[in-house]
Image (cartoon, coloured by chain):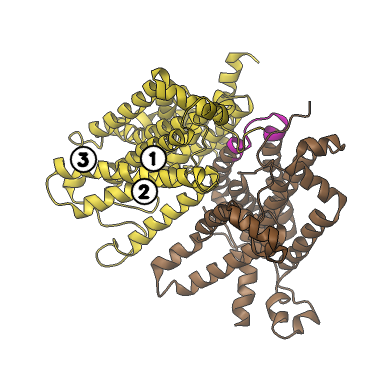
Chain colours: A brown, B yellow
Amino acid sequence: MEAAFASIIAAATPLVFAAVGETITERSGVVNLGVEGSLMLSAMTGFAVAVTTGSTLLGFVAAALVSMAAAGVVAFAGVRLGVSQIAVGFVLTILAIDLSDYLGAPFVGLAGPGVPSLSIPVLSEIPVLGPVLFSQNIVVYASYLLIVGAVLFLYSTRSGLALRGVGERPEAAFARGVHVTRSRILATIAGGALVGVAGAAFSLDVKLGWREGLTANFGWIALAIVIFGGWNPMRAAFGAYLFGVLQVVALRLQPVLPGLSQVLPLLPFPLMILTLVLINRPWLRRLTERNPALRFLVAGPAPSALGRPFHPD
Amino acid sequence: MSRVVRLALPVVAALAVGAVLLALSGVSPSEAVGLVWEGAFGSAAKVSDTLMSWVPLVLAASGLVVTFTAGLWNIGVEGQIVAGAIAATWVARSLPGPGWVVVPAALLAALAGGVAWALLAGLLRTRGGVNEIFGGLGLDFVAAGLAVYLILGPWQRQGVASTSGTDVFRVQAWLPTLPNLRLSPLAIGIALAGLIGVGLLLRGTRPGLRLRAVGGNPASALVLGIPTERYLLGAFALCGALAGLAGAVQATGFHHKLVPAVSGGYGFLGILVVLLAGFRTVWIGPLALVFVAVAAGGTQLQLRLNVDSSLSGVVLGVGVLVALLLGARGAKEAPPLVEEP
């Protein structure tokens, strides 16, 4: 049982990075629809660099840089040039997937380095929790820090408050002296870096190696989880772990019910639609307004200015 | 920036990236150009294959022009193609009788399937308040999941279930083709009818004009007395119908069975075509031909020079991206995620 829970945490870790990263981006009012492509390109880059140099660390760094560059294109085009964010992100996804297939072809099937496991002394000896949470590897531990850090940043720091303001009411934030364009570009690139780490976490840890379509659909799933998580990093991480449960269950069902186990990993999408329907129901909103204690059960609404361009003049 | 530069730069950038990537793989770009041409148009069989992939792309792109005009991002188009293919497969598998009964019935079923799937996204948007990008994306995967479930479950191949698809349909359920070629004049006719129909609708008719008003500014359109919801749902339905037909062509004219990737990615590729063409339907036919020719050329490069066929997608993607950054018409006309207040 402990082993199963440990494998769920491990399987969900790349999605935690991607979903928390995209949550930060979307909190600033930018949708990066290029996540699916960035994830693939960074998984390929991370693996290729790690195989060539023999260093997993360099693999992670290269993956993050590539994904930051892709996010930079979305940010520059969408925020500075005012081109549709949706259009640029979408085209970038299609381009990046084909580019990773092309450039990654020589690396298909190669054996490469992986992230070594590392039990944390003392903590890993806690009954139940120890083996599940603290007998993993450094990437998994980093994801815990990321979740806590993202929550603290968004809800307890001045810059986090400013960032949320930029995503909700850019005009008001601008009037208060916040540099809207710069915050959005930074948030998009920071989110891109985390998506890059997620990509490398796939090819250097969870799914060791590179082949075409290694991370297929995981970027779209991350986007769905951001919505399911109500644009809150903690809930997004929870969504990623729920998806980890689905993946592990699907894997176990594979020999018994092949049809179902192929379909099960698609469950986040109907759940995303359901979440979107629910957050728009007036009765649900009234219920949470009357009983603030229930609020944690209900996903929050999208940032009001999500996808809306802002012109400072 | 001059018009010439805006049109030429994307092409130059795409070709330059293609040449660099080819050089990295040790292939001479000039040799590759010849092979691309040969792969797309080198023989009657090649031309007919290229045209048969032109059909679903044109159908998807024509439908997408309608939803774009209505101010909608119909990302759900892939799912609508799959829904059409599933419906066509259902008829092809279960309806007995000669070809002149089964083929039209399969086409009609596909049309209905595409409409139903599109209306689902439409109602989620108009009644559920779910943005069509995320609703459509979700429904894409639900449709894909349904196809996989059917292929591995109720419609599995005789013997052992496999993700390679269902059993091949009986020949009466195949789209009729020219002798010895895979070219189906019926499919070409459907694509042309869809393209021209959409062009005429948007250009010279009252509903077309009103649709444009809804897309431009839904609030003022409503004030002017245009039933906005009906127009939005109508746009979804029309796009779904054309996408469903694309699915039928894929299933009954190309694969002759239902496969998991039955959409062939033509829905998403159609979005790229429309982003370049904007609302100008006249450009869709030629642009779609360039797209499928490059894709066919990519396959040829893989066969002959062992260059990964994804190169064609990279070249097209770079071209579209550069065009977007330079302010391609479609990029300006692309609807925003939320309306500006």
Q: Secondary structure at mark 3?
A: helix
Task: Name the quadrant containing residue A136.
Answer: bottom right
Q: Nearer the viewer, residue A82 or A8?
A: A82
Q: Which residue is mark 3?
A: B104
Image location (x, y in percent) of residue A172 = 80, 37
Instruction: Please report contact status of discs 2 and 1: CB closer than 8 Å, yes or no.
Output: yes
Range covered by the magenta-colored residues? A77-89
Image location (x, y in percent) of residue A143 = 73, 63
Answer yes or no: are tags 2 and 3 on the same subunit.
yes
Residue drawn at the location 34% of the way across and 33% of the way down: B55
Q: Secondary structure at mark 1?
A: helix
* Viewport quadrant of the C terminus of chain B: top right
Amino acid residing under circle 1? Gly
Query: Disc 2 or 3, which lies upstream in sequence?
Result: 2
- The chain that hosts pointer 2 is B
Q: Is residue B324 left or right of residue A116?
A: left
Q: Which residue is mark 2?
A: B83
Q: Which residue is mark 1?
A: B240
**What is the distance, in whole Å, between disc 2 and disc 3 at their CAs?**
17 Å
Q: Residues within 10 Å of mark 2 (few under 14, many from 20)?
A: many
Residue drawn at the location 39% of the way across and 17% of the way down: B204
Q: Residues within 10 Å of mark 3 (few under 14, many from 20)?
A: some
Residue drawn at the location 73% of the way across and 43% of the way down: A167
Q: Residues within 10 Å of mark 1 (few under 14, many from 20)?
A: many
